[in-house]
Image: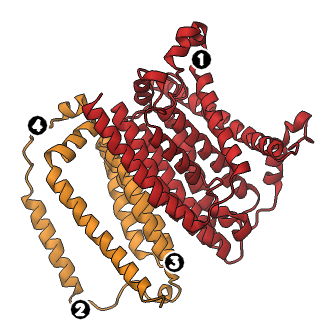
Amino acid sequence: MDFLIEVIINVIKVAVVFGVTLLHVAYATYFERKVIGRMQCRLGPSEVGPYGILQPFADMFKSLFKEDIIPARADKVVFFIAPMIVLAPTMTSLSVIPFSEGFIIADINVGILFILACASLSVYGIILAGWSSNSKYAFFGGIRSAAQVISYEIAMGISLASVFLMAGSVRLDDIVKAQYDYPFSMYAPHLFIGFVVFLIAAFAETNRTPFDLPEAETELVAGYLTEYSGFRYALFFLSEYVAMFIMSSIMTLCFLGGWTIPKFVTDILPFLGSVPGIFWFLMKVYFFIFLYYWVRATVPRYRFDQLMKIGWKVLIPLSLFNLLLVAFVKRFIL
Amino acid sequence: MTVQQLFFGYFFVMILALSLVVITRRNLVHAVLWMLLMFVHIAGLYLFLNAEFFAVIQIIVYAGAILVMFLFVVMLLRLKEEQALPIFVRGLHGRLFVGLAILLVLVSMAAEATKGPMGQYSIDYIQRHSHLKVLGTVLFNDFVYPFLILGFILFVPMIGVVVLALKRRSHGPS
């Protein structure tokens, strides 16, 4: 009986997290179009509903009813499963993110490494989408994406290793709690190099501008997405926005103190301590999501050789230096 | 039959069956995909042994890095003609005997296997300190010299590849 209740509670938790995330994706697209519109002196969507607020639903219905085109000489099975290979691991990694004190679907010991494992599985979907489309633009997009994600995953992993070293754990819950005792209650000022490296690598991991070479419109049509249409295209789109949410959550949890607020703030304004943690968590996450849009509207795309140079000659040495520095400080000074 | 045996049986059968599927595919990209599924099952087997860290590392390193490299090579080689060739080479010649000899060596080794000494790392000790901490202590403190030598061995071919690539470039693109 206890087992059954536990299962039901977990099913409800999963439903809540997935439902809220899908709604988040719907409005993240609206938010993006509005923000970028304003930055380019336009209004953004404004026709469907007041202030265009129903635009995401209009987009959703449109993509659901669109014709699903499969290229004649495509590898059909791989073409079908590629969007699912991208989406499934991305959604799964939502299950280990603690949104607030104690609100987590699966509290496992290897929390953050699990997210990295899921991220490395979803690369397959992109490569296979490019390969199975039987089109040179899609193929180039897929190959570029593989090279990019593998290169930046290393810098990302090493910069996260400095966080593990400081916190002495890879459980996201422990990492947040370990941060609370430091001044500012976050690691970002202490692990500044690691934070910056992770931030840049996160942009590359999610294929966003200035690293959106896999889907560079001006040279590759739409990269690995070229041959996809209708609902399958929407699935790729969905997983890109969920991946952005996950990357922002990792940055929030590992560098900005997760659902806590700095101790000196609650000392001055004690009533803020009673605000639920999820509010602070989402504030920090949406700061990063806004940053994604801001960068997209203002920074031009890199060339591919520049991208590789930044990854291997700048970010990886910097993150290694940061790791050694943290190890030294942790061993001899703290 | 307990639940544990059921799970173990599932992983055991699936890993064997999937490895057979991998070597019989004509399309190499499909073979790599089946191999990915096999790696996920191996990770499941590690989870079943309470070694969560190894399960995750199995996915990150083997599925996320090494197999992607395989996929890269397979996709860039454009093996259209090779796909028409028969998958297995006909005739036995000496190959069968080589295979059987290796099998014999492995089986005789397995028969002689004994349980190693316990050492200081008991299950209780590992549970008290975390899995990761114990692994780190063993790897970076107890066995630091073998670890450094391994790193050096992996470093040498990397330099070799860079030297070869630079040499070709200095002679001009060919």
User: Which element type, helix, strand or loop, lies under badge 4?
Assistant: loop
The kind of residue tagged 1 is Pro
Residue at 46% of width from left, 42% of height from top?
A: A193
Name the residue beneath numbered marker 4. B120
The kind of residue tagged 3 is Leu
Q: Viewed as shown, does residue A214 lie left or right of B10?
A: right
Q: Earlier in the sequence, mark 2 or mark 4?
A: 2
Q: How far is mark 3 from mark 1, CA to CA?
A: 52 Å
> Would you say the residues marked 1 and 4 are in contact, meaning their CB atoms lie under 8 Å apart?
no
Q: How far is mark 1 from mark 4, CA to CA?
A: 45 Å
Residue at 38% of width from left, 59% of height from top?
A: B62
Please state the chain letter of the residue tagged with numbered disc 3 in the rendered image.
B
As drawn, B63 above or below A119: below
Residue at 37% of width from left, 66% of height from top?
A: B19
User: Which element type, helix, strand or loop, lies under badge 1?
Assistant: loop
Q: What chain is the red one?
A: A
> Would you say the residues marked 3 and 1 are in contact, meaning their CB atoms lie under 8 Å apart?
no
Q: How far is mark 3 from mark 2, CA to CA?
A: 33 Å
Please state the chain letter of the residue tagged with numbered disc 2 in the rendered image.
B
The kind of residue tagged 2 is His
| Image quadrant in which you'd find residue B70 | bottom left
Name the residue beneath numbered marker 1. A276
Colour basis? by chain
Q: How far is mark 4 from mark 3, CA to CA?
A: 49 Å
Q: Colour of chain B?
A: orange
User: Which element type, helix, strand or loop, lies under badge 3?
Assistant: helix
Residue A112 is situated, as x and y percent measured from the top left of the image, at 44, 40
Name the residue beneath numbered marker 2. B93
Residue B5 is situated, as x and y percent measured from the top left of the image, at 29, 45
